[in-house]
Image (cartoon, rainbow, N blue to C red):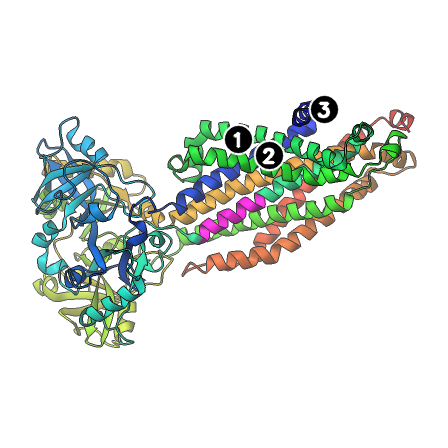
Amino acid sequence: MFSHYIRSFFIHLKKNRFFNALNLLGFAAGFLLLTLISAFVYQETAFDRFHKNADRIYRLHPVGYGVTPACFADKLAGKLPEIRRLVRLSTVDLPIRTKDTRSATIKISYTDPAIFEAFSFPILSGRPENALKSPFSIVVTESLARRLFGDSPPIGQTIQTADTAVLTVTGVMKDLPYVSHIRTQAFVSMETLRLKEENQTFGCGSWSMLTYIELDEPADPGSVAAKINELLEAFRMDTGDGKVRLVLEPLADLYFNGEGNRYDGSVHGSRQTVMLYLAVSLLILFIVVINYINLSTALAGNRIRETAIRKVHGASRRQVVIQVMVEAAGMALIAFLGAWILIELLLPQLSGLLNIPLDGAFNRGLLLPACLIGAGVLGAASGLVPGLLLSKTEASSALKDDTPLRSRGGLRKVLLVFQVMIVAGLLNATCLISSQMAYVLKLDLGFRPEQVLSFRMDGALSNKKDLLKRRLAGRPEIGAIAFSDDLIGGGFGQAPIGNEGNKTLCYFLSVDPDYLPLYGIELTRGRNFSWDNPADFADGCLINEAAREAFGLDAPEDKMLDKYRVLGVVSNFNFISLHQAVGPLIIHCSRDGQVAQVRVAAGQEDKAVSLIRQACLGISPDYDFNYTFLQEDLRGHYRAEINLRNSFRFYALIAFLIALLGLFGLTLFVIRKRTREMAIRRLYGANTGQAFRLLTGEQLAIVLTANLLALPVSWWLMDKWLDHFQYRIGVDAAVFVKTLGITLFFNFLAASFLLFRLGRVNLVESLRQL
């Protein structure tokens, strides 16, 4: 019996080739999007789940912040039997040089030896239990080892850092997978950092370390967290509203909890974005199914005699339904295979278009069979309604050339309204996301980021900043030059500042006196740092307005904040991200900045880069000059939203094209169905305008109804999405007017095509067929 269904499917495929081609295109476009979304969702939900002990690893942090002092791990070591392992992590960019003068700036993470026991980062060479026990030992990734040492064995090789420390390679590990929230090129022993920065980093006042805890299997994380809070009572910061509460957050939850782990420097995703993509995939499913149902039910009248003959030969209603469902499933499977081949051929281009690394997400062994099954089920479901409709055919009436198939025009209208509503909703979302991102990227940040080039210096350059300045001074391509310990938008350090019982967690930034003029940051009170005043470099600081308000300082000049003397107040500039409000910031005066920032002349960027490179290499011949422009760095804060915008543009376009395919098919069907009717109307004197109103009135009502239904849903959802930004636009009615205009325009095009085709019909030939 099933072979009979297959033969009938291929026979059906040859009939109505044009309409079947439209259905295939609709299915293929839908499956293209659904497969891409499935790969993305699979990748996002797989973060950090590859670790063998993932279900027992937690991060210790205060509510809302991802960082803790380094001393917390020391205070907890050996105190609680439920704690199996403690691992700290501190990630920085580090300029390095190998003994054969190869230099680079790499991302390294200072960490404890237990990292290879707690986390599943496979060691390819070296002994994981001893790799990070000794000071100045480093374990590099496979790709970094090839980059630095070529084909030479990396074990035992040495790497010199910018501060003249010499690291010895004790192991090589596999590159960290994309689905790890920890991103680094090398692990350096924590003892190295302790020897370099004992007082600065390892006290209990510097909140800059990530602390991970692996618990024993029977341990309850809630109970352990309570014990930790009790043990660290004396070291937990007092904000005036009580001491901060420490929590244990499961490793698998960290990636999606960027808001609760602010300033941890880790990569984060958005659970809301994943849910949004899943919702889009469901909407696209509806569009694909609606397309097939509408075209199939519209053409069902052409299959009445075929169905009647099947019934005369003994086919039951159930068999008729199965036949139609098999045809739909077969069509869906063919379309899916075409979409899969297209994805395989264009995967790099699609990844670039959406700015999402999809190649790693394509677990073909899992995704292909799952999508094949899904395509078959979806196709069969699409054929259910047309199958039920045809199964009601009365054989006797059909063979007498009656019209036994009841009209399903009402069903088609409802489905069309729903389809246009989905497309309108996607267009609304795309326009609003684009408007918000345009607003964010053009917002006044309180400083001038344009034309600022930055690079991290090595030790030789850092020791000769004045020489570098002199060599670049006076060149028309070069403007102001300043140095700081970090870049705006980077992971500023934090520490509690204030009187006991009223401490505030403040950000810290060390800069030289040229920093404020370089960025055009407004000084609202007091004065700037001065090169001629040595006391400024000893204890001078500037605070922002947020810090002034947090400390309640009406006249902050010359007030002391712990060991810092306030010289002035700067306006609140957005030094982190527009997702968050500006926090309290203390700017310290320093000559030790490792990050150079140079304002270059507009239109002279290439020449300025060449001049800076020559000046740097003239001072440090082996320096690996890598630079970025600050505006591009700042855009990285909104990479997820930019990806979402690009994805929605792509998805909305494809969904729109799928809907247009359906509209085009239904238009051709109407042409066939109403040719005689329009011929008679023209014979009795109907003009073009009357014909146009007759043909477009119903479609106009469908488009208007769909847009009205889409408006409140789109408004509510996008308002919720915009709430994630501290600085946001309002939901503008102009967006919905634009969407209405787009959908009406294409409806007008379809109606015009319909009228044009009907206008070319020969009246005499049409009437002869009556």
Q: Secondary structure at mark 2?
A: helix
468 in magenta: no
* Residue type beneath disc 1: Ala
- Residue 344 coordinates in the image, percent (x, y): 45, 28
Q: Which mark is residue 643?
A: none
Q: Which mark is residue 15?
A: 3
Above or below for 72 versus 117: below
Q: Secondary structure at mark 1?
A: helix
Q: Quadrant of residue 527?
A: bottom left
279 in magenta: yes
Query: Which secondary structure is most common in the magenta stretch?
Result: helix
Q: Is residue 95 visible?
A: yes
Above or below for 269 versus 403: below
* Residue type beneath disc 3: Lys
Residue at x 43% of width, y 53% of height = 271
Residue at x 42% of width, y 49% of height = 641
Q: Say whether residue 732 is left or right of residue 109.
A: right
Above or below for 518 versus 587: above
- Residue 639 coordinates in the image, percent (x, y): 38, 47
Q: Quadrant of residue 13?
A: top right
| Total labels drawn | 3
The stretch in magenta equals 272-284
* Residue type beneath disc 2: Phe
- Residue 650 coordinates in the image, percent (x, y): 51, 40
- Residue 742 coordinates in the image, percent (x, y): 62, 45
Residue located beneath label 1 in the image? 339
Q: Say whether residue 715 is left or right of residue 316.
A: left
Q: Quadrant of residue 683?
A: top right
Front residue of 464/478: it is 464
Proximity of marks 1 and 2: CB atoms separated by less than 8 Å: yes
Tell which circle, 1 or 3, labels the residue nearer the N-terminal end. 3
Q: Which mark is residue 27?
A: 2
